Amino acid sequence: MPYIYQFLARARERPLFPLLKKIHVKSVMHLDSTNELLLFLISSNSPSLTSAIINDIQECVEVPAAFFLQELACNSKNVLQLNLSGELGKILLDIIGEFTRLANLELTLTFTDNFPDFVKVVSSLPCLENLVIKAVGDLSQEQTLTGLERASFQNLHTLQIQAPSDTVSMIFCAIYPTALESLTLTFTDEPDEMLVPHIDKTIRHIISASIAKSVKRLKLGDYSSPIPWGTFLPLYNSQLLCIEAIDTKADYIGKDILHRNPNWKTLQTLRLTTPVENPANNSISISDLPLFTELCPALRLLGITVSILGHSETEKIRSHSKAPCSCHGLRKLYLSCLAPTDTSFINEIFIGRFIDNIFPQLTIFKALGFSLEGNSKNLPWSKGVQTSVTEFREVRRKAGHICCNMK
């Protein structure tokens, strides 16, 4: 069948696949010679192609994979997205540099002696805005940085890195993304408490003053070793719009980080949730939620793990519940509530009134927590709080409170 396509391609003046937009090769390793020929025909007869995904590139098939990419670069000038995974040697990396209009690049690879080639080629792409790097294995500083000039990546806006901490650190020793707006880091090290200081140092290096001035969104992927939240303080700048670290075993976020007066005036999204079951003494409790109305006036989404210390918080919560409504503009609130030390304190209506008063514009409120012991229906306490918040909001709406009409 591919030979018929080849004959038709030579006989026609128009390309065979003029409207083809995307091609996805799941495994180059498992292509036989017939399918390889068809692949080459597609690459040379698809002028409208904008996206190519090629997986499972091994050393033994690097030449046909490189030939396909070469044809693609020559005949499909509109390729904007390229995803490659496998063993990417110098030949393949050099060809990537020929996709001059490439805006989105995702590479899953093992760094060996190809790291300098990777930096040189990727930094040469004039239109690159989004880069995803999924690296396997550690980099050796002596082997990778010798004679390597730091690349500027002046147009790069979004960077996602999934790699061991040493590799992440080396990448940032080699690149200098001056216009970076969104940074996502996922460390793939095995759980090791001894790595904590190293991870801390790595992140502090990454969010140096020059990068922190431009970064607006920081996301920390799943990581199984604790990371001090104080590490992220250099990013508390006036540009920051989003901080997310969900279900990450970070050091439990404490009150002290809120009292350091972080510059969160423009922050719109804050998600810091951990699976920690035993909060520290200085952990954020549910009665500390009003602090976010002062520190984050522009906040629209808050997701956080809080402790419920018990009766000692009653007066503090009652005081906030009786205070004038804050009219804060928070729309979405996600709480992970740890089991209280005093179950006599956890009245759902009492807590619901408190939350409604400090965040009266909520449209979505979800609380994950525990079930009440001794409750015949074994209903989650969090469900009762959600119901209570909804009822208080409805009362205010019917009363024509100004918060209900704000956008």
Image (spheres, rainbow, N blue to C red):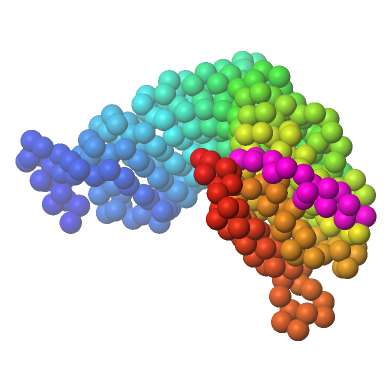
Q: Residue at x 76, y 29 (%)?
A: 262
- Specify the farthest residue to the front: 399
Number of callouts: 0
* In the rendered image, the vertical position of residue 306 relative to residue 69, given as above or below: below
* In the rendered image, the vertical position of residue 25 relative to residue 263, given as above or below: below
Q: Residue at x 60, y 50 (%)?
A: 362
Query: Foreground residue, 275 or 123?
Result: 275
| 328 inside magenta stretch | yes
Q: Name the image quarter holding residue 339.
A: bottom right
Query: Foreground residue, 404 or 167?
Result: 404
Report whether 280 appears left or right of 331. right
Percent x, y for residue 131? Answer: 51, 33
Q: Is residue 94 visible?
A: no
Range shown magenta:
312-329
Q: Residue at x 36, y 42 (%)?
A: 52
* In the rendered image, the vertical position of residue 272 relative to residue 169, given as above or below: below
| 274 inside magenta stretch | no
Report whether 338 appears left or right of 266. right
- Specify the farthest residue to the bottom: 376
Q: Quadrant of the N terminus?
A: bottom left
Percent x, y for residue 342? Answer: 90, 65
Percent x, y for residue 330? Answer: 62, 43
Q: Main secondary structure of the magenta part?
A: helix
Q: Name the image quarter holding residue 117.
A: top right
Q: Is residue 317 visible?
A: yes
Percent x, y for residue 134? Answer: 58, 42
Query: Foreground residue, 126 or 221?
Result: 221
Query: Foreground residue, 171 or 370?
Result: 370
Q: Residue at x 64, y 58 (%)?
A: 392
